[in-house]
Amino acid sequence: MSTSNVTFYERVEDALGNDTLQTALDRTTTALRNNRNNAIGSLPEAEALRDHARKIRAHTIANLDKYLIQFVENVEKMGGTVFFAADAEEANDYILKLAAEKEVKTVVKSKSMVSEELEIREEMEERGIHVVETDLGEYIIQVADEKPSHLIAPAIHQTRESVAELFQKELGATDEEIDSVANMTDFARRQMRRDFMSADMGITGCNFAVAETGGITLVMNEGNGRLSTTTPPIHVVTMGMERIVPTVEDLGVMLQILARSATGQKISVYSNLVTGPRRPHEPDGADEYHVVIIDNGRSNLLGGELAEILYCIRCGACLNACPVYQSVGGHAYGSVYPGPVGAVVTPGLYGVDPWSELPNASSLCGACEEVCPVRINIPRMLLKLREEVNEKGHNPAWLTGGLKMYAFAAQRPGLFKFGGRMSGIATNIIGKDGWIKRLPGPLSAWTDHRDFPTFAKKSFSQRWKEERGS
Ligand code: SF4
């Protein structure tokens, strides 16, 4: 995964000034948040279920080697082939060689964050292979030549109006074909149907891989997963090595919390369980079944301070809850994985040096941990990464110097009190009605987009003394 030349702060500026994005983010994150809260709230044993799910994830990640071996044995027993890829290059080489060997001309692809990590579509297109994204959101992204901006809603940055315009401009849709969301969906479905029927290969992701059966699960609300896995003669699964659950019973727990946390549904419309290639008595299914298990930096996280992020089930709830994501959307993060989870996963997988701004893209309010179905302590890991960013000298001099001055004062009560009093006086002189419209120097980054509150005229300890007399 590469970083662009545009900095995080420049992308944020663009995002904050983009009215279409702001409308789209406001509409969709609010709806997803409300749906999630209602769905979790209506489940009497929700908290116990979340605890149970966390235990399953913690146990699986602590025993990942054992469950991966069991999973691989079972896939092979069913007639599938497994390939372990150390990185994106190895995974892509395997898939591209397979495509060349089998003379693949058309590929239908269902939504998968790992395949975004690999950029396999782009690699195949460069070699003249026709690749069609079949999830509606991903299809929109492909037509717009963009990257996804949310884990479960890749086109969250688009409005229905902008998609209508895109379909007319790029695909020649008529006025009637774009006059409602239903008609636009129908239009996209008709475009894809031809490709499903002629595809030589289907590429999917994998929400969960079950060690005890060797099966994989695809959770979705569109029928594209079924078509991608059953119509082409070759099915390739791309999965991160942490996607394992030990048993079918554990899968049941995960499915209950995934849909509720992601879209607010009790269960997604389709939970596809794929168990290897087509058996001789079966009427449909792929003749060849390949599972590509991708490490790509994950094993470096095992056993370390960031290992907990491997519990993630990619529900996207932390994105919808995060005030930073709600304001800037996914593209500002510059990575396949946006939002609070991305601010840990991206530097975790690829190192903090190229991604040093991401751990600071958080107010540390804790909303991400609160909604996370497996209770991942994202704020703790963000602090850990911030420490590393600071140690490696990525913070600007004014911030490092300012924090040193603060630490110096905070250890001297007299100086701290004096500083607090002075700040109260100074901010109330330059502020009006409790708010400052413009701060000087680097602090203006705050007031470019919002006001800054003045300090209280009297400190807490002053008021305490006045009220309690001691
Ligand atoms: S960190 Fe938690 S809330 Fe965020 S995507 Fe992963 S599982 Fe969902």
Image (spheres, helix red, strand yellow):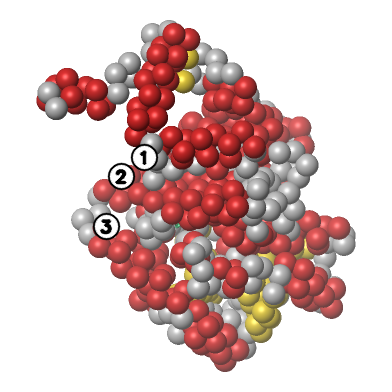
Q: Residue at x 76, y 73 (%)?
A: 90
Residue 34, label in figure? 1
Label 2 packing within 10 angstroms: few (<14), some (14-19), many (20+): some
User: Residue 257 at what x, y percent from top left?
Assistant: 37, 59
Q: Residue at x 49, y 31 (%)?
A: 26
User: Residue 464 at what x, y percent from top left?
Assistant: 19, 26
Please say if the residues under marks 1 and 3 sit with CB atoms less than 8 Å apart. no
As rendered, which of 122 and 420 lies closer to the eye? Answer: 420
The answer to which of marks 3 and 2 sits earlier in the sequence is 2
The image quarter in which residue 48 lies: bottom left
Q: Which residue lies under the disc numbered 3?
A: 46
Secondary structure beneath label 2: helix
Residue 38, label in figure? 2
User: Residue 457 at what x, y percent from top left?
Assistant: 33, 16
Name the amino acid, label 3: Ala
Q: Residue at x 36, y 66 (%)?
A: 54
Does 340 sit left or right of 179 as displayed?
A: left
Secondary structure beneath label 1: helix
Distance, label 1 to label 3, CA atoms, is 16 Å
Name the amino acid, label 2: Asn
Judged by depth in the image, the label closer to the viewer, 3 or 2, is 3
